[in-house]
Amino acid sequence: MAVLNEEQEMLRDMAREWTVNESPVTEFRKVRASGEPEAFNRDAYATMAQMGWAGVIIPEEHGGSDFGFLSAGLVVEELGKTLTASPLVMNTVAASAIVLGGSDEQKARWLPRLASGEAIATLAVDEGPSHDPAKIETSVSDGKLSGTKAFVHEAHGADLFVVAAKDGLYLVEKGDGVALTTRKLTDQRSHADVTFDGAAAEKLANGGDNLLDDVLDRARVLTAAEMLGMAQQVFDDTLDYLKQRVQFNQVLASFQALQHRMADLFADLAQMRSAVEAGLQAVDAGFGVARAATIAKAEANRVMHTMANEGIQLHGGIGMTDEYDVGFYLKRARVLEQSFGSSSWLKDRFSKLSGY
Amino acid sequence: MATQIEPATQTDEDAFRAEVQQFLADNFPAELKGQSNALAGVDGPTNETPAQTKWREAVGARGWGTPTWPKEYGGGGLTKAQAKIIDQEFAKAGAYNPIGGMGVMMFGPTLLEYGNEAQKKEHIPPITRGEIRWCQGYSEPNAGSDLANLQTFAEDKGDHYLVNGQKTWTSGGQWADKCFAIVRTDKSDKHKGISFMLIDMDKPGVEVRPITMISGTSPFCETFFTDVKVPKENLVGEEGQGWTIGKRLLQHERTNISGGGSLARLMGQSLGDIAKKYQPTGADGELADAVLRDKIADFEIRWNSFLLTARRAMEESKAAGGVSEISSVLKKLGTKLSQERSELLIEIRGLQGLGWEGDGFSDGELEAVRAWLFGKATTIYGGSTEIQNNIIAKRVLGMLDHQ
Ligand SMILES: Cc1cc2nc3c(=O)[nH]c(=O)nc-3n(C[C@H](O)[C@H](O)[C@H](O)COP(=O)(O)OP(=O)(O)OC[C@H]3O[C@@H](n4cnc5c(N)ncnc54)[C@H](O)[C@@H]3O)c2cc1C
């Protein structure tokens, strides 16, 4: 666990207390049952914003707390543990794009509203089902943006899209020229293909050539933080279960074959935590971000993948039921694994960044 | 089972092949081409179309859905070589075997081995005609891997047993006509107190509650028995022989899960071919994503070895006359590989491979997602992978328990 300052500890404890008490997995079940495509509870999100969570990486002058990404990650990790459905991750990533690339006017216009929860933003980059930021066809002429973005997270709740076009990132408000087609994935969260047809767009002109990569790296580390929380929870639940479930007149936890499995997962989880926290810290330090974020997401993918499978396997038949939570983690895990970098994409990027 | 006489000559085989082809031409309704057997699985209620009924009855009348079972009980009375010809010719014609389900896969072979004459006469023919659906009443809330811990009790009432208790994870319980169950007839001995009996699901006191699975369907149930009267003639074998019979049935189950045919069909299409439809390719048509390409090749090489292992095991066990200990190895390998394949399909398709519902996904894509989720159960049921490992380590390799 990274060494936290007092503010960060308070933030984490607050997030932990709130998710456990106010947003356990039963709340996610309610969201799922509602069948609403936006797939989150507006009241809960308003509360989260009131607690300052939507503004953790937003500068104080624009209504945020400017605690940084490690702090944001602490909150996101807790949300991941209980599968809290909210646009917080995507809103944070989109806000970071404005922080990095927005003009003073754009910042003043959007950041306070994103920090207060009054408006919600998301990121729209990929144009196909696999992450590939090198393949962008979306273009802008005369301030009108056209193109189709695939599987945009939290598209239904968003008021504002940060859209990747061939020549950079743009802000596009939901409205004329923006059409959503819902894509329902296994995680039962908000995803949509978004078609922009001559939608009014404003460029984020200040972020430099690496703006898209910088923003995607922020998406990677925060997604990895969500996965970290999920993996931790699956691990904890599985361990608890093995300590309770009796077969052959003994608790399952007493079987050496299972002890070793849990020991392996425990070690994996330690690796994942180190990688994710280092990714978040690299963003805050502004140094070695690409490499650290790649490692963070790659390790998150690897460990979460195994953790979800093992969680179900070690629960036995009960793990296969909708009544038990562990299946939800699996179904969310794969969606996140395929978002902002699959394992093979990340390995390729890592090799390139490392010069081989 | 009776010893098989291999066909004498190639001409016999050719003649039989022609007979199967003629049968298909006469009986297989063209509209069913490419369909699979809705009755075989446990996936749901079945309202057969007239064509499906006709096809099932035609195959059932010949006993060709259970080709190697004895003729006197409605089977085909054929050799393995002839059964293979039926398989091949059906596949060529796009025809499915309409006779299936747990009755065919596990209960029938077990009853043929352990049942008395009256039981075989009563229960085997309806299975060969696909008329009766069976479910498996083994697991209980506290008897999963430790199956012998089962507590459902059958009290001796003279001419019948009175059964009380709860089974769980009963696949297809809500659609089954009958249940083969292992129950306790003696509380004083864990293994020798178990008996194998047949319970009608429509008897008073039998209640089923479907359970929803992570794949969104409800193919299994909790099954409650409250003062259910089971006639004594429904006891298979002797009282106390249930553990032996029940385990025998599990061997058949394993062999089926690791697949004989079903997995092979499932795995049929090359992952590489699928990947080329979803992923960019280079100048020579190779997959551009080298990591993914490596993973697919790695998988397909191991899948190929698995098929070779399965074939070798089958040939080797022929001499032994039935299922063998290697069934544990095959079950463990086959289920793991099929899970890996499902995961690879997701990697290949990206988010397009994670659709839950809606227009944006093809039927094949959506089915693959549900199969991926359902497939997580294959390493749990039929004796989990961990239990297969225990069987291999202890019984096959003779490694001692340190505890
Ligand atoms: C989809 C599905 C369909 C099913 N259909 C049927 C059916 O039709 N009829 C029926 O009777 N049952 C059915 N089952 C039940 C199935 O047989 C049991 O789930 C299985 O035996 C495992 O038992 P359990 O679920 O109680 O898990 P547990 O026995 O509690 O096992 C939990 C975990 O601990 C591991 N474990 C247990 N003991 C050991 C050990 N000694 N050493 C190492 N690891 C161990 C297991 O491998 C597993 O990973 C079905 C199950 C599923 C998921």
Image (tube, rainbow, N blue to C red):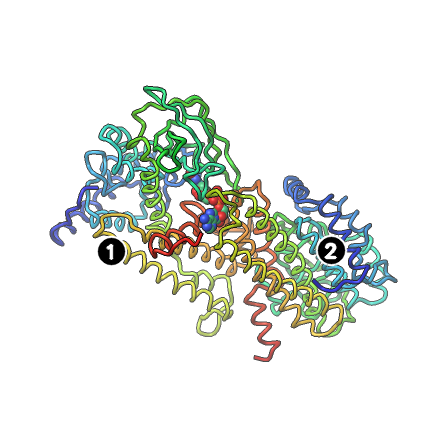
Asked if residue A132 is positioned above or below residue A311 in the image, the reply reads below
Asked if residue B21 is positioned above or below residue B140 in the image, the reply reads below
Name the chain under label 1. Answer: B
Query: Residue B314: where, in percent of width, then height?
Result: 27, 54
Placement of the N terminus of chain B among the 4 image quadrants: top left
Asked if residue A118 is positioned above or below residue A302 in the image, the reply reads above
Asked if residue A130 is positioned above or below residue A23 in the image, the reply reads below
- Residue B247 visible, this orientation: yes
Q: Which residue is mark 2?
A: A75
At mark 1, the secondary structure is helix
Q: Residue at (35%, 43%) from the top-left corner?
A: B250
Is A122 positioned to the left or the right of B79 in the image? right
Q: Residue furthest right?
A: A61
Query: Residue B358: where, in percent of width, then height?
Result: 56, 46
- For label 2, the crowd category at 10 Å Cα-Cα, with few meaning under 14, some 14 to 19 and many 20 or more, is many
Is A229 positioned to the left or the right of B206 in the image? right
Q: Which residue is mark 1?
A: B316
At mark 2, the secondary structure is helix
Amino acid type at image mark 2: Val
Name the chain under label 2. Answer: A
Query: Residue B151: where, in percent of width, then height?
Result: 44, 33
Q: Residue at (42%, 57%) from the top-left corner?
A: B337
Query: Residue B321: where, in percent of width, then height?
Result: 22, 48
Amino acid type at image mark 1: Glu
Residues behind callouts 1 and 2 on a single chain: no
In-front residue for pair B138/A54: B138
Determine which of the numbered discs, if any, sits on residue A157 in the image.
none
